[in-house]
Image (cartoon, helix red, strand yellow):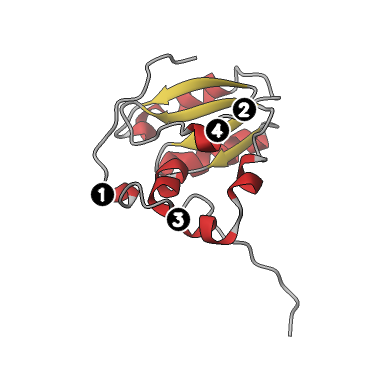
Amino acid sequence: MMNRTFGNTDVSRISVFHEVDVEKIRSIWAGRDVVFVTGKNSRFFDDPRLFDSMKSVKYMFVEPVDAWRHYEETLEKALTFDKSKLFIICAGFMATLLAFDLHHHGYQALDMGHLPNCYAEYLKEAPSPECLAKVIVRDDAA
């Protein structure tokens, strides 16, 4: 029998809050300069209960639909940021590839999906993220 360890890939889903203390999750970005990459008018929101420990925050907005068509532009823009920034990407299917490519360029990047929405769901303050209407986010792109 092989001795293997498997991680939970549901880090941005409700199940993570049943398994990991929220303070441990918050410690990932505590004191860090962060770039949120998210869709314009998406369901993402920067819930202070999760994100108020960050040193600074910038936003990089992508198209909410068919972001793939602008992937190269998105990657090029992301690569203009200092490598000390932590990217938290909540941009659908594109997020995984962007996190992968940024990693290969020497950045730290996390595909965090619906993390804040799932936290609200865990606290019984909101339904599943897939049931939410779109929310208008700030348009203060970096």
Q: Are marks 3 and 4 in contact (CB under 8 Å)?
A: no
As drawn, is 117 to the left or to the right of 83?
A: left
Q: Secondary structure at mark 1?
A: helix
Task: Tell me the amino acid under the disc marked 3.
Answer: Ile
Give the mark, 3 or 4, whose residue is nearer the N terminus: 3
Badge 3: residue crowd in 10 Å (few <14, some 14–19, many ≥20):
many
Residue at the image position 41 percent from the left and 44 percent from the top: 93
Give the mark, 2 or 3, whose residue is nearer the N terminus: 3
Quarter of the image where one finds residue 136: top left
The correct choice, above or below, for 33 with respect to 124 in the image is above
Nearest the eye: 119 or 108: 119
Give the mark, 3 or 1, whose residue is nearer the N terminus: 3
Q: Which residue is under mark 3?
A: 14
Q: Secondary structure at mark 4?
A: helix
Q: Are marks 4 and 2 in contact (CB under 8 Å)?
A: yes
The percent coordinates of residue 66 (x first, y second) are 31, 34
Task: Tell me the amino acid under the disc marked 2.
Answer: Met
The correct choice, above or below, for 100 with respect to 57 in the image is below
Give the mark, 2 or 1, whose residue is nearer the N terminus: 2
Cα distance, mark 2 to mark 3?
A: 22 Å
The correct choice, above or below, for 134 with respect to 3 in the image is above
Q: Is residue 10 visible?
A: no
Q: Which residue is under mark 1?
A: 131
Q: Which residue is under mark 4?
A: 51
